[in-house]
Image (spheres, rainbow, N blue to C red):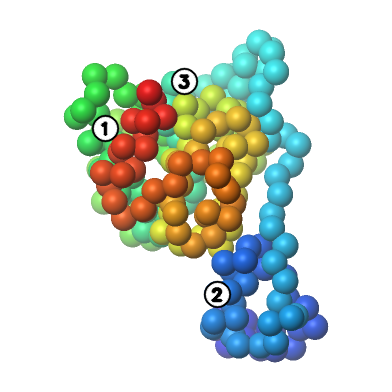
């Protein structure tokens, strides 16, 4: 993969990346003429929007019922593996529950990947709802009905879930590292993803 990517970058007339962070990473690992590498950020489809009326709300809740999810809930979305930093998110959630009488259920949407078995067992013991795969058509409902999206990823070339959640009108907590500050601008709470205390404090701030 490393060899093929380097070959492709050298042969290409233009290289597009989805963020300035990704552009700089590409140039760091595959030094080429900087002018041929251009950042073109991702966007979101028109289906990612706030709900407008009671009919939309009822449709969302019918969608969520298929996944065993009932509002209110705190959402984390993405495949379950170490890069997504869900172990620290779980620690922060448990810390939050120690400090508050009432905390919404946490929902994790995404497929289990490598290194996730022990984490999934811990999450299930803590009452986290794991939906596994979520169909693309169902994502807007999952975002819209969430109290917040928490996306404390350690490394992202872009990170689409925060942008999609914000387009749905859902508050976002995300990492202050890699590409994520580019994605959310000043419209989300950003935290050090390695600091469990800061993640818990950010969740408490949004609940308040």
Residue that sits furthest to the front in the current view: 186
The residue closer to the viewer here, 79 or 150, is 150
> Do the residues under discs 2 and 1 have CB atoms within 8 angstroms?
no
Residue shown at the point (44%, 21%) measured from the top left: 72
Q: Position of residue 101 (x, y in %)?
A: 24, 19
Mark 2 Cα shell of 10 Å, populated few (<14), some (14-19), many (≥20) = some
Name the residue tied to disc 3: 71
Q: Secondary structure at mark 1?
A: helix
Q: Residue 32, located in which quarter of the rendered image?
A: bottom right
The nearer-to-camera label among 1 and 3 is 1
Mark 3 Cα shell of 10 Å, populated few (<14), some (14-19), many (≥20) = some
Label located before the other in sequence (3 or 2): 2
Q: Is residue 100 above or below residue 201?
A: above
Asked if residue 44 lies left or right of residue 73, the reply is right
Asked if residue 149 lies left or right of residue 7, the reply is left
Q: Is residue 153 above or below residue 4?
A: above
Q: Residue 108, located in which quarter of the rendered image?
A: top left
Q: Is residue 170 above or below residue 31?
A: above
The residue closer to the viewer here, 200 or 80, is 200
Residue shown at the point (55%, 75%) measured from the top left: 25
Q: Position of residue 139 (x, y in %)?
A: 60, 36
Asked if residue 30 lies left or right of residue 120, the reply is right
The quadrant of the rendering that contains the C terminus is top left
Residue shown at the point (75%, 80%) measured from the top left: 36
The quadrant of the rendering that contains the N terminus is bottom right
Name the residue tied to disc 1: 96
Q: Position of residue 176 (x, y in %)?
A: 44, 54
Q: CA distance from mark 2 to mark 1?
A: 35 Å
Residue shown at the point (53%, 54%) measured from the top left: 181
Residue 121 seen in the current view = no
Name the residue tied to disc 2: 25
């Amino acid at each position: 993969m490393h060899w093929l990517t380097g070959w492709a970058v050298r042969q290409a007339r233009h290289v597009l990346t989805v963020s300035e962070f990704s552009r700089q990473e590409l140039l760091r690992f595959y030094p080429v003429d900087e002018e041929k590498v251009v950042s073109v950020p991702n966007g979101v489809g028109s289906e990612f929007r706030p709900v407008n009326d009671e009919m939309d709300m009822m449709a969302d809740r019918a969608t969520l019922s298929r996944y065993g999810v009932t509002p209110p809930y705190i959402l984390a979305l993405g495949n379950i593996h170490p890069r997504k930093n869900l172990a620290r998110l779980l620690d922060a959630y448990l810390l939050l529950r120690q400090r508050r009488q009432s905390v919404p259920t946490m929902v994790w949407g995404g497929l289990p990947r490598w290194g996730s078995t022990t984490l999934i067992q811990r999450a299930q013991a803590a009452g986290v709802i794991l939906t596994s795969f979520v169909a693309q058509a169902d994502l807007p409902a999952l975002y819209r009905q969430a109290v917040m999206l928490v996306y404390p990823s350690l490394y992202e070339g872009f990170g689409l879930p925060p942008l999609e959640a914000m387009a749905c009108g859902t508050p976002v907590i995300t990492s202050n590292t890699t590409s994520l500050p580019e994605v959310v601008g000043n419209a989300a709470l950003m935290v050090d993803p390695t600091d469990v205390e800061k993640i818990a404090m950010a969740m408490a701030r949004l609940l308040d």
